[in-house]
Image: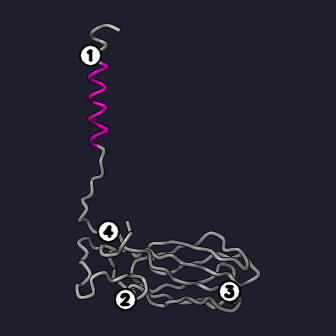
């Protein structure tokens, strides 16, 4: 390799090193953290679908936030988040495979929840009223779920992203 080739290789190496060095994380440590997923328990029985709790995001979730500073309010959210991250923890207590169906302002369907087995399903929901049913089981009365507009920050929670 000649002198010009070595110089070109050195320049290319410097450019590559500069690009790699510039690929750091672009957030600041004081940016708002994402919300913690809200868990909803769903039991599928032969004659009904049961949802607990029936209302979420109506205010602080008593059992999902760990208050770190008792006399200080939760930090305000700077960005308005329209969707609530919801994790449905499902128990299918029937002898039939089914899917969890969410109908309302946003519609979604889970993967198969096998007979007499648990399952989980995660979806982002806007505020509104939802009908939760078991697909292919018209004899199982659907449940109702209400999603409010409250969106919590995990800013003061310990060991969360």
Per the rendering, the mark at residue 58 is 2
Q: Are marks 1 and 4 in contact (CB under 8 Å)?
A: no
Identify which residue is drawn at 40% across, 77% down. Answer: 126
Identify which residue is drawn at 42% across, 84% down. Answer: 147
Identify which residue is drawn at 47% across, 76% down. Answer: 86
Lower position in the chain sequence, tag 4 or tag 2: 4
Kindly report the distance in space between the C-alpha atoms of the residues bearing marks 1 and 3: 74 Å
Residue indicated by mark 3: 138
Q: Is residue 97 left or right of residue 52?
A: right
Residue indicated by mark 4: 33
Choose top left, top right, bottom left or bottom right for residue 120: bottom right
Lower position in the chain sequence, tag 1 or tag 3: 1
| Magenta region includes residue 137 | no
Tell me the element at label 3. loop
Q: Give the magenta-colored segment's residue range.
A: 9-22
Lower position in the chain sequence, tag 1 or tag 4: 1
Lower position in the chain sequence, tag 4 or tag 3: 4
Tell me the element at label 2. loop
Identify which residue is drawn at 26% across, 35% down. Answer: 18
Kindly report the distance in space between the C-alpha atoms of the residues bearing marks 2 and 1: 64 Å
| Magenta region includes residue 15 | yes
Lower position in the chain sequence, tag 3 or tag 2: 2
Q: Are marks 4 and 3 in contact (CB under 8 Å)?
A: no
Give the camera-side residue of 21 and 98: 21
């Amino acid at each position: 390799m000649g002198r010009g080739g070595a110089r070109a290789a050195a320049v290319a190496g410097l450019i590559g090193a500069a690009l790699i060095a510039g690929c750091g994380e672009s957030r600041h440590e004081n940016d708002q953290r994402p919300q913690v997923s809200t868990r909803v328990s769903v039991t599928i029985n032969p004659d009904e679908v049961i949802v607990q709790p029936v209302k979420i995001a109506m205010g602080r979730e008593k059992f999902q936030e760990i208050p770190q500073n008792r006399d200080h309010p939760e930090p305000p959210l700077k960005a308005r988040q329209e969707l609530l991250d919801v994790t449905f923890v499902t128990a299918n207590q029937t002898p039939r495979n089914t899917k969890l169906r969410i109908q309302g302002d946003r519609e979604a369907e889970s993967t198969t929840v096998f007979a007499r087995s648990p399952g989980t399903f995660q979806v982002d929901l806007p505020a509104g009223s939802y009908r939760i049913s078991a697909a292919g089981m018209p004899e199982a009365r659907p449940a109702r779920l209400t999603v409010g507009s409250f969106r919590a920050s995990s800013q003061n929670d310990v060991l969360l992203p």
